[in-house]
Image (tube, rainbow, N blue to C red):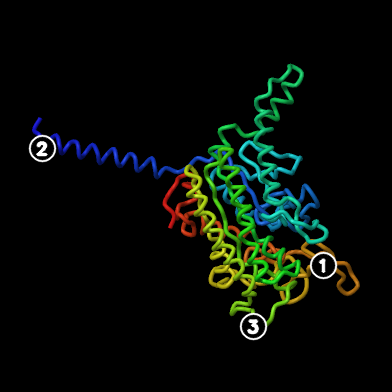
Amino acid sequence: MEPRLKILLSLIAMVFVGADRWKVSAATCEFPAVFNFGDSNSDTGGFSALFVQAGPPAGETYFGAPAGRYSDGRLIIDFIAEAVGLPYLSAFLDALGSNFTHGANFATAASTIRPPNITLSQGGVSPISLNVQWYEFHDFLRRSQIIRNRVLTSVMIGEGGFFAQLMPKEEDFRRALYTFDIGQNDLTYGYFTNMSTDEVRAYVPDVLDQFKTVIKNIYDQGGRSFWIHNTGPVGCLPYVMDSLPITAGQVDEYGCADPFNQVAKYFNSKLKITVQQLRQELSKAAITYVDVYRLKYTLITKANKFGFVQPLKACCGHGGKYNFNRHVGCGGTVRVDGKEVVVGSCKDPSVRINWDGVHFTEAANKWIFDKIVGGAFSDPPIPLKMACQRHPAH
């Protein structure tokens, strides 16, 4: 064969091999399970199982009844599960009807990253902080495999076999997606315990050190794909604006309390640095940082543009400037003209952003998810379905 023809054929072969390799690297991930850690923004029933059920009208839009979520319907974590082709996550703490074949949800409402030093009744903070969620996960990993692999006696084989089918496979822990949405309560907890803004900012590094420890612990157990949300604009939430002292000069042009949002942005800047450090230290991890703050603030401040109304008012609430009363929440009862009236939802939750003064409606959650799923608000900018792949961060 002529030398020049050999060279040409070799070059063509290299192009096809390179293209084939590119196809492999660009292939979407197949996550067999999702394990979620967080607070009420992603709680699918943990707090309800542990303390008190999120009662009606919660869940009315999608589930038709309370479903352990502090919203009228689905949360962002539900849309994540849908997008990767998995069922909605059962709460680890829920003993009734749970199926953990495709993952588990360790998030509970009112949870913080840093362990609280007060009780739930004293300060409204859950005892199920992120380190406790890690302990739960570690125990779940170990015990689920004992259940799957146990040598069953002939008497137990029927019952034991059934429970084994509700547990994830051992290899699924390595191939799973690990999602995180937590940190909001660490910031508001400081303010609700009379800390100054400087004091809240001062403990952020310690909070993130503890977050970093949990990520490393999961990595040591085989976790490789991490999807981490930053925290949202807490200064735009009715429960913050109604409950904490705010001067007129601290309110921005959209009606949000700027000092609280600035603290959230500070937290997020430090969280992003923490993620960068984790990428350097965990060589086999794919870690995606997702900027939900920018999306939530955009949605709230430009609500009309996106088909929403009254962005700073709770849909399910009662009284005051923000339709929020911290003493009587969504689903509670109030006396109006001598009669007891249930605090119900607004006429059309599909055009509202805030559900109950603290959490978002299904419509808002869906709007946010639709923006993040493609990777436009991620660092690195990769879609959810490619979150198992390591890419250079921006």
Question: Label 3, label 1: how many angstroms apart (C-alpha)?
Answer: 27 Å
Question: Label 1, label 2: how many angstroms apart (C-alpha)?
Answer: 84 Å
Residue furthest top in the image: 154
Q: Quadrant of the N terminus?
A: top left
Q: Is residue 159 left or right of residue 81?
A: right
Q: Is residue 100 visible?
A: yes
- Mark 1 touches mark 2? (CB < 8 Å): no
Please identify, in this view, whether the residue under mark 1 or under mark 2 is nearer the observer.
2
Relative to 47, say whether 359 is above or below.
below
Question: Label 3, label 2: how many angstroms apart (C-alpha)?
Answer: 76 Å
Residue positioned 63% across, 36% down in the render: 101
Q: Is residue 333 left or right of residue 361?
A: right
Q: Which residue is mark 2?
A: 4
Q: Is residue 239 visible?
A: no
- Tell me where residue 368 appears, x and y as whole percent: 56, 60
Relative to 390, say whether 140 is above or below.
above
Relative to 50, say whether 356 is above or below.
below
